[in-house]
């Protein structure tokens, strides 16, 4: 009798853990499936800033390729802060002048 109650408890534990695993897997599947669909695509037409690419460098650092209007920025984001690595595209009128004129 004692062995049967232990067996019931173990089977109940396996059943509950299986249900938890199945629920987590289902949530991940739904999240991945709906993340690829742009349900509100028409609302995003007027946005000026876009993330073009993301690459994880290591556990704490992330490279981002951002686009604002016609300018692209390569940015390193990490625990030490944010660092602008590269900028391509349109420049402001103040940046077109001589770099040594600013004190």
Image (tube, rainbow, N blue to C red):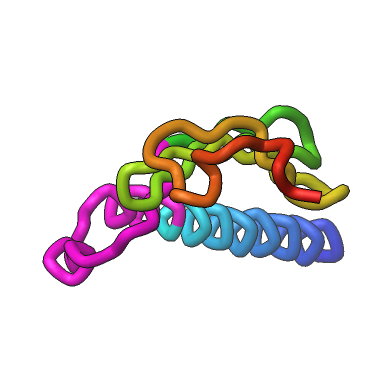
Quarter of the image for residue 76 reads top right
**View extreme (left): residue:** 42
Give the x, y percent position of residue 90: 38, 40
Q: Quadrant of the N terminus?
A: bottom right
Between 47 and 99, the residue placed more toward the observer is: 99
Residue 43 visible here: yes
Give the x, y percent position of residue 39: 18, 64
Residue 54 visible here: no
Query: Residue at left 39%, top 51%?
Result: 68
Quarter of the image for residue 42 reads bottom left
Query: Residue at left 17%, top 62%?
Result: 45
Between 80 and 30, the residue placed more toward the observer is: 80
Residue 62 vertical placement versus 47 (above, below): above
**View extreme (front): residue:** 101
Give the x, y percent position of residue 26: 41, 55
Between 5 and 79, the residue placed more toward the observer is: 79
Residue 41 vertical placement versus 86 (above, below): below
Query: Residue at left 19%, top 68%?
Result: 40
Q: Is residue 8 magenta?
A: no
Q: Does the magenta stretch include residue 37?
A: yes
Q: How many marks?
A: 0
Magenta residues (range) = 28-52
Query: Residue at left 45%, top 49%?
Result: 93
């Amino acid at each position: 009798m004692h062995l049967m109650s232990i067996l019931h408890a173990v089977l109940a534990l396996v059943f509950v853990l299986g249900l938890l695993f199945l629920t987590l897997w289902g949530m991940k599947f739904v999240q991945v499936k709906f993340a690829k669909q742009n349900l509100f695509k028409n609302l995003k037409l007027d946005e000026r800033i876009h993330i073009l690419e993301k690459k994880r460098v290591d556990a704490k650092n992330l490279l981002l390729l951002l686009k604002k209007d016609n300018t692209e920025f390569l940015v390193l984001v990490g625990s030490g802060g944010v660092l602008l690595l590269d900028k391509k595209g349109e420049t402001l009128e103040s940046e077109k002048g001589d770099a040594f004129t600013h004190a």
